[in-house]
Amino acid sequence: MAGEANPGFDTPFGQGKPVRKALAYQELLRERGFIASMSRKGNCYDNACMESFFSTLKSELIYLTKFKTRAEARQTVFEYIEVYYNRIRLHSSLGYMSPCQYEQHLKQVAA
């Protein structure tokens, strides 16, 4: 019925567990010196780099591959990220260098 809490489904309005967990998590971040990145509703700019990454992952790998098992998918995604995306693939936002090349470049500039 409308208005009744579903015991198998927590909502921020029901028993308050998700809200308490979120507040506890934010407190843990503060204690450890982290700053949570949260923007207002409808402002996606702080998440734009991850949205771009997942879009690239899907278009370059996921949609083009038929995985036989979950383990195969996990291994293939790992290899895509650790071998291809970070070490080989050129990124226009990094001056057409791979992330590893860009990191080395920054170390040389800082030295």
Image (cartoon, rainbow, N blue to C red):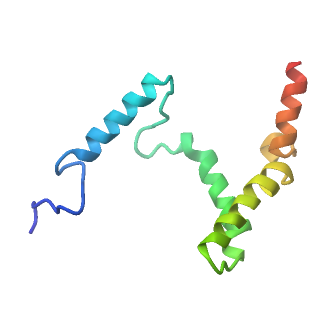
> Quarter of the image containing the C terminus?
top right
Q: Is residue 76 above or below residue 14?
A: below
Q: Is residue 23 left or right of residue 57?
A: left
Q: Is residue 35 above or below residue 1?
A: above
Q: Is residue 62 above or below residue 82?
A: below
The residue under the point 72% across, 76% down is: 64
Relative image position of residue 71 (x, y in whole percent): 63, 70
Residue 8: which quarter of the image?
bottom left
The residue under the point 17% across, 48% down is: 15
In this rendered view, identify the residue nearer to me: 26 or 2. Answer: 26
Relative image position of residue 95 (x, y in whole percent): 86, 41
The residue under the point 33% across, 34% down is: 24
Q: Is residue 42 left or right of residue 96?
A: left
Q: Is residue 23 left or right of residue 2?
A: right
Looking at the image, the residue that sits furthest to the top is: 111
> Quarter of the image containing the N terminus?
bottom left
In this rendered view, identify the residue nearer to me: 100 or 53. Answer: 100
In this rendered view, identify the residue nearer to me: 21 or 42. Answer: 21
The residue under the point 24% across, 61% down is: 9
Relative image position of residue 5 (x, y in whole percent): 13, 59
Q: Is residue 103 above or below residue 99?
A: above
